[in-house]
Amino acid sequence: MEKKSGGLGERRIMKIEGQAVEIPAPATEIFHFLEKMDHVGLLMPEQITDWKGNELSAEFNIKNLGSSGLCYGLNEYPLKINMLASERSKIKFELNACIKELAPDVSRIYFELLADVNPFIASMVTKPLQHLTDTMAKNIKHTFTPGASQ
């Protein structure tokens, strides 16, 4: 974790990297799928509810945390989709979909989350955030490979 000081005491940038999965699709197809917030909503775990997305952003509720939101940041076609926490979010974070094309019709993807949290909060949110990134990977694999086991 990278240390950062601020008005609320010591904070750290926590990095959570989800499991990587291989998908039978070119990187461009995966990138275009993730460019729509409604599609991103399909990948979320059950703790994310009331998803309302449009072309550029989404609002949703997180069980036991309240309302939050995402908007697109600086995407790197076709390798990275960058999503940023909206002003509504209690935790400031960045969610990245990192895509690597392995062959013309096979790509690898993983989700990476960077969160600005104090050490006390970090201990409580690490497991749920790991679950988020792993679930998103599992769900995108299932989306592109309907017969894939969950």
Image: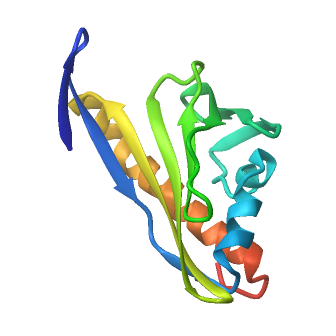
Q: Is residue 33 left or right of residue 10?
A: right
Q: Position of residue 113 (x, y in %)?
A: 43, 48
Total numbered labels placed on residues in the image: 0
Q: Quadrant of residue 14?
A: top left
Residue furthest top in the image: 7
Indicate whether 29 appears above or below 101.
above
Residue drawn at the location 62% of the way across and 64% of the way down: 78
Q: Quadrant of residue 144?
A: bottom right
Q: Position of residue 90 (x, y in %)?
A: 49, 22
Q: Position of residue 150 (x, y in %)?
A: 64, 78
The image quadrant where one finds the N terminus is top left
Q: Position of residue 38 (x, y in %)?
A: 80, 48
Residue furthest front in the image: 77
Which sits in the foreground, 78 or 132? 78
Q: Quadrant of residue 3?
A: top left
Residue drawn at the location 64% of the way across and 30% of the way down: 69
Colour scheme in use = rainbow
